[in-house]
Image (spheres, rainbow, N blue to C red):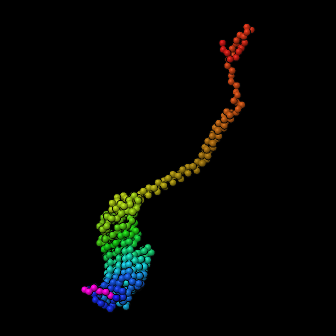
Amino acid sequence: ICSFSRSHTRMDHACPSSCICAKDSGTVTCGDGEDTEVPGDIPEWTSTLILKGRNISTLQRGAFMSNGTELQMTTLSLSYNGIEAIEPYAFLGLPRLHVLDLSHNQLEYISARAFHGLLELRSLYLNHSILPPATEQLSNALNTQSLRNLHRLELAGNTLKSIPLLRLDMHNLHALVLINNSIESIGGGNVSMLYQQKRIRVYLDLNPFRCNCELEAFYYWLKNSSQCPDAGRLLCREPEAKRGVPVEKLREEDVDCMNENLEAVSYVFLGIVLALIGVVFLMVLYLNRRGIKRWLNNIRDACRDQMEVYHYRYEQDSDPRLANVAVEAPETSDRVVGGHGRQRVPGSAL
């Protein structure tokens, strides 16, 4: 069933079912449907094919070849189709394709040869499509000579933890969109590649950067180049003390690897010195073990003698028989009693 605007389209029996065909503009639009495969009767005159809201779980080999012939299609939009896997040579037969949009799918598998044959591809959109199982496969899929003319690559919202650039031919890449991923740091290898490709613009907003020594190379790249248009919006997520601080506003000492390395080395050196001191101390004790033993024995004997003295005194003081010790009586005095001479009366004084 085909629908057309009066001024730009006309009826054409080659229009696939459940699609809208506009031959004058070369556009075929296939909306929501229960089909699980790409329409097999795509007109040869199609320059733009839009498939949306379908249940295409797998893009099979040569899925867009019409009766074994190549199409002159330049734009292909496959967003919101629930695509889970892209098999090798899935886009075979589209040698003139310039724009490929695979956004908002659920890709768990991407073949290393998924984009083989797209020699003229200029823009590739994979926003909100890459699930964790396909993250590593993505780098292999982008590592192909077929994408050497790629100008724009969008990978926003895919929880990527690193930039998949080391295997990508970037000589013609102008824009790399990595907004809203899980990138914490960008290694020196990727930074060196970015320095070499002056024309590329990298968008990195809404990533949880870890602002420590590992960010040093990237920090200086931000400061010294204009290749990141959203540099002012890049914020630190860790450590807690720097949360919310713009990466550009960090101090050089915050990302100085030399200071951190020197501090670590100093602690290691201190530990080694303390260990050596301990070893020397133990050696001295071992070499003087006889003298130390004699000294300890002397101290023990002295302590024993002293304790015996204290013990003896304690026993004497605690003997009840010593409590009634006689005290010397006071002087006696003579008194005359009853005229019979003097009588000594104790306790009196004359």
Which residue range is magenta in the image? 2-7
User: Measured along the vertical axis of the image, is residue 9 above or below residue 242?
Assistant: below
**Quadrant of res 8:** bottom left
Q: Main secondary structure of the magenta part?
A: loop
Residue at the spot x=54%, y=50% of the render?
A: 281
Residue furthest top as drawn: 339
**Residue 154 in sight here:** yes
Residue 317 on the magenta span: no
**Residue 111 in sight here:** no
Q: Nearer the viewer, residue 307 or 86?
A: 86
User: Measured along the vertical axis of the image, is residue 314 above or below residue 168?
Assistant: above
Q: In the image, is 284 to the left or to the right of 166?
A: right
Residue at the spot x=66%, y=12% of the render?
A: 350
User: Measured along the vertical axis of the image, is residue 283 above or below residue 63?
Assistant: above
Quarter in which the N terminus is drawn: bottom left
Residue at the spot x=38%, y=80% of the render?
A: 53
Residue at the spot x=71%, y=14% of the render?
A: 344
Q: Nearer the viewer, residue 126 or 213?
A: 126
